[in-house]
Image (tube, rainbow, N blue to C red):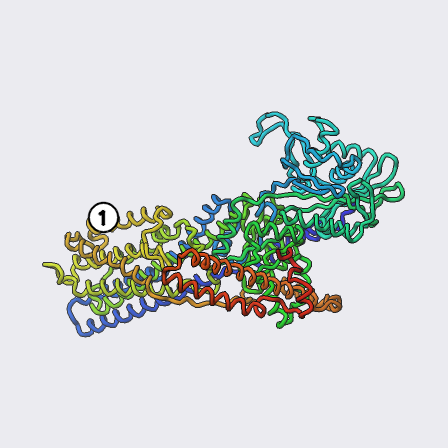
């Protein structure tokens, strides 16, 4: 073995350096919008404070020039302190605190949902996710593979009780022993998995010996095949607690010698050349059935003889493969060939093979995956599956979990076809427009390699999508780094983990769906705090400014200490209360928010403006004429000012209820079980305000209020609730933002990948000249057929509805005028669909083709049934 590169120059080192990124990560869109908003609010507050100080100082100077009574140079200091307090209240210094609390709290809670967050920015980014590119094995499935059925020598077999069980598999007696031996030897040697005996449990306590797979060797597919070998051979070799049958086969073959040619993702196969005892060489091959079958020119028939593989027999084998794949089985082809000579080769032999058998491996779908996929789709997030399985198996599994649907016009494509398609259309605007239509409906990528996944992520990001991707291998590191959010399996390699943003502790797709929920919760909680912060800022600054100007500096509706107490409530305690609310899956009922959307939506502006206007008017009226509402209360006395201060604070506390909802929700008291901390903080603030008013006296410039004053202030403050709820009924249309690639604000890594893709397309232009447009034509054909399937499904569904009404009519259930009207409209709609079927649904074809061929040939995916 020769070491040709180490460190940063090795393949793993290059991936590690690439995963670290070329530059520091850019601020997230939310961080940039928060900075802009904080800067705007700060400037507005500083301008208001400066203007107020100038106005009050000029008034005081004018009074001093006129030598009016009550002037004092110390008033300038009071004005300055008041303006400083206004700046402190106006500047949202609690905004970074709210963001930090929301992200840290969600990070801790996401760990309970089996999401270990490595980068906090991933929490908020998942709230904007529009695409999820998921692996199949272990994420959508249970990663508990076992052989369930197959064909050996063209004879079918099925395993009644699949799995790693200590009982033999009963195969039909018609199977030839020499054929079975060829199969078991080929499977036992073409594997890197190993089993070892363990005498300690997970807590390192002594226990009875048991067999366990080595965690760092092989994969689940090899494990399933070796379990199958053990259960087939145990009947012939007998039980041996010290050595398993596949280990015995390896020891026997090791004595005579063999050479292994490892599995690669390009070849999709593994092979071994064995020297038998007589010196003859046999080449055993195992791999994807669609990769092994083209290498064969003979096959073993049911009699155990080698016969030529003609077109009819090849079609039968392909039908076997399709049958197993449509049952969601991973299909493994097994073949062999006898070689001339006796010396073990150094290069993999290229002689034609003999098709020996086909093995179907099933990996059960996780029971919660279907519901998780449905929730993601309901939330406007497109779920795509990338797998190394053949296309029939991929379509069958994706159909089970709801990712692929003919009724939606979805398309399945192999990684090679997708790669050729991208290289065929990239750089041509007209072709790219056709490509986007194909990409939008391509939900399954079969036979995909890590670079294909990376290319898919890149094209989605250039489309303007926010992409999350899952992976576990070293080759997945570039795609994990490139995506907006990278999910890595807990069992992933070190390089993959370092490239990812979130680690899936249970390797389950449901955890990805929960990350979407928490991401939206983070964004919502920050907006809730902003809604309260802006309301209080508007009211406090406007009330203090106008009140001081009207009073000519003689008094202020809110003193410096009172403003600081309000600032403490709004910035610290409110951030803690509103930023820690746990999510509800009701957030999945709406689509993702665009990354270009402002933090303060139009709906929030309506609520903030209406509530702030009401609170300002009430406080201003109370400050101007409130003393007349009660007996023996002087204007601007401490009792009067305490009443205004109490009204303002409790108005802000009641507004906290309204701020719990951001959209059209009317019940602001819903979901208190998810925000118990909110209730505790609200009770503390209300209680502390009561204690402060009744006991703090000179410290906060307050005095005890009468019972009537308490009642009036609480009543006027409580009206904030119905006014805030009433704003939910105002029709507000939020702006829409087109999905487009923002090259100016994307990270340097993305720019580098785009430039690299353009360079690769240019370099391979001559090579692709011979097949120019072929990939796009195939993709367009697949898209047309997908549209035909979608229209066909819609017609069938419409026909069922019409037939239901017809049955109701025959059964005399059409007495209602409403039923008759609906029935008539359904008949008209169905007639219109049928009339336009040939134009909207049928793919273009000549009359001869239409008469000769039914529209059932699909380039990508299974035939139309």
Between 238 and 722, the one nearer to me in the picture: 238
Quarter of the image with the N terminus in it: top right
Left or right of residue 743, residue 762 in this image: right
Residue 27 seen: no
* On screen, residue 426 above or below 564: below
Mark 1: secondary structure: helix
Q: Which residue is depicted at the point 86% across and 34% down? A: 277
* On screen, residue 310 above or below 79: above
Q: Which residue is mark 1?
A: 691
Left or right of residue 73, residue 502 in this image: right
Local crowd size for mark 1, using a 10 Å CA cut-off: few (<14), some (14–19), many (≥20): few
Whole-percent x, y for residue 683 in the image: 28, 48
Between 778 and 45, the one nearer to me in the picture: 778
Q: Which residue is depicted at the point 40% across and 57% down? A: 812
Whole-percent x, y for residue 456 in the image: 61, 59
Between 123 and 171, the one nearer to me in the picture: 171
Whole-percent x, y for residue 49 in the image: 31, 66
* On screen, residue 853 above or below 121: below
């Amino acid at each position: 073995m020769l070491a040709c590169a180490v460190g940063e120059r090795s393949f793993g080192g290059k991936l590690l350096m690439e995963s670290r990124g070329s530059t520091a990560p850019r601020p997230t869109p939310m961080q940039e919008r928060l900075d802009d908003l904080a800067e705007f609010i700060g400037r507005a507050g500083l301008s208001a404070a400066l203007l107020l100080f100038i106005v009050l100082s000029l008034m005081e100077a004018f009074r001093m020039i006129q030598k009016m009574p009550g002037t004092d140079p110390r008033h300038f200091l009071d004005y300055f302190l008041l303006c400083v307090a206004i700046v402190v209240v106006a500047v949202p210094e609690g905004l970074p605190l709210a963001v930090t609390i929301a992200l840290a709290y969600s990070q801790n809670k996401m760990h309970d949902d089996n999401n270990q967050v490595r980068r906090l920015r991933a929490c908020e980014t998942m709230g904007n996710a529009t695409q999820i590119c998921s692996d199949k094995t272990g994420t959508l499935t249970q990663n508990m593979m076992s052989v369930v059925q197959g064909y050996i020598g063209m004879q079918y077999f099925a395993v009644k009780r699949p799995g790693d069980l200590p009982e033999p598999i009963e195969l039909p007696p018609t199977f030839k022993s020499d054929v079975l031996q060829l199969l078991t030897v080929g499977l036992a040697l073409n594997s890197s998995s190993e089993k070892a005996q363990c005498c300690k449990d997970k807590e390192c306590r002594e226990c009875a010996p048991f067999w366990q797979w080595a965690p760092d060797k092989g994969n689940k597919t090899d494990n399933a095949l070796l379990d199958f070998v053990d259960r087939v051979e145990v009947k012939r070799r007998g039980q041996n607690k010290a050595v398993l049958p596949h280990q015995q086969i390896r020891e026997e073959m090791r004595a005579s010698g063999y050479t292994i040619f490892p599995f690669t993702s390009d070849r999709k196969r593994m092979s071994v050349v064995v020297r038998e005892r007589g010196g003859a060489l046999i080449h055993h091959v195992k791999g994807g059935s669609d990769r092994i079958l083209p290498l064969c020119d003979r096959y073993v028939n049911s009699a155990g003889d080698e016969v030529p593989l003609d077109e009819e027999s090849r079609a039968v084998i392909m039908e076997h493969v399709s049958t197993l794949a449509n049952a969601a089985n991973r299909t493994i082809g097994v073949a062999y060939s006898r070689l001339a000579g006796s010396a073990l080769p150094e290069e993999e032999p290229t002689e034609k093979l003999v098709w020996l058998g086909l093995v179907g491996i099933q990996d059960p779908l996780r029971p919660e995956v279907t519901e998780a996929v449905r929730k993601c789709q309901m939330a406007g997030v497109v779920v795509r599956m990338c797998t190394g399985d053949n296309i029939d198996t991929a379509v069958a599994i994706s159909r089970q979990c709801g990712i692929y649907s003919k009724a939606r016009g979805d398309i399945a494509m192999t990684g090679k076809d997708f790669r050729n398609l991208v290289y065929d259309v990239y750089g041509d605007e007209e072709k790219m427009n056709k490509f986007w239509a194909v990409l939008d409906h391509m939900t399954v990528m079969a036979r995909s390699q890590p670079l294909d996944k990376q290319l898919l992520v890149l094209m989605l990001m250039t489309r303007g999508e926010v992409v999350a991707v899952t992976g576990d291998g070293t080759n997945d590191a570039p795609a994990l780094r490139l995506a907006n959010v990278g999910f890595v399996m807990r069992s992933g390699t070190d390089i993959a983990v370092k490239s990812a943003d979130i680690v899936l502790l249970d390797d389950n797709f449901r955890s990805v769906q929960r990350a979407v929920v928490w991401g939206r919760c983070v964004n919502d909680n920050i907006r809730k705090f902003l809604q309260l912060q802006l309301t209080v800022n508007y009211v406090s600054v406007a009330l203090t400014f106008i009140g001081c100007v009207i009073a000519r500096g003689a008094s202020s509706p809110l003193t410096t200490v009172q403003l600081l107490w309000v600032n403490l409530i709004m910035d610290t305690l409110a951030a803690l209360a509103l930023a820690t609310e746990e999510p509800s899956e009701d957030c999945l009922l709406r689509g993702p928010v665009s990354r270009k959307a402002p933090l303060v939506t139009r709906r929030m502006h309506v609520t903030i403006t209406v509530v702030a206007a009401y609170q300002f008017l009430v406080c201003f009226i109370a400050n101007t004429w409130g003393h007349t509402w009660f007996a023996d209360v002087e204007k601007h006395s401490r009792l009067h000012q305490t009443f205004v201060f109490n009204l303002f604070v409790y108005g802000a506390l009641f507004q906290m209820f309204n701020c719990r909802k951001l959209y059209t929700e009317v019940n602001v008291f819903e979901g208190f079980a998810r925000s118990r901390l909110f209730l505790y903080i609200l009770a503390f603030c209300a209680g502390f305000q009561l204690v402060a008013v009744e006991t703090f006296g000179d410290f906060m410039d307050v005095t005890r209020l009468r019972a009537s004053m308490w009642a009036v202030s609480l009543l006027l403050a409580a009206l904030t609730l119905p006014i805030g709820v009433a704003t939910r009924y105002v029709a507000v249309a939020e702006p829409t933002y087109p999905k487009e690639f923002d090259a100016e604000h994307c990270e340097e890594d993305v720019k580098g990948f785009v430039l690299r893709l353009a360079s690769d397309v240019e370099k391979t232009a001559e090579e692709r000249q011979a097949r120019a447009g072929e990939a796009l034509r195939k993709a367009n054909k697949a898209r047309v057929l997908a549209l035909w399937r979608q229209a066909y499904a819609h017609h069938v569904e419409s026909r069922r509805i019409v037939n239901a009404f017809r049955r109701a009519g025959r059964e005399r259930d059409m007495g209602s005028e409403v039923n008759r009207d609906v029935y008539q409209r359904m008949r008209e709609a169905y007639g219109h669909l049928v009339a336009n079927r040939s134009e909207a649904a049928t793919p273009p074809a000549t009359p001869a083709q239409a008469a000769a061929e039914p529209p059932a040939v699909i380039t990508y995916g299974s035939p139309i049934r």
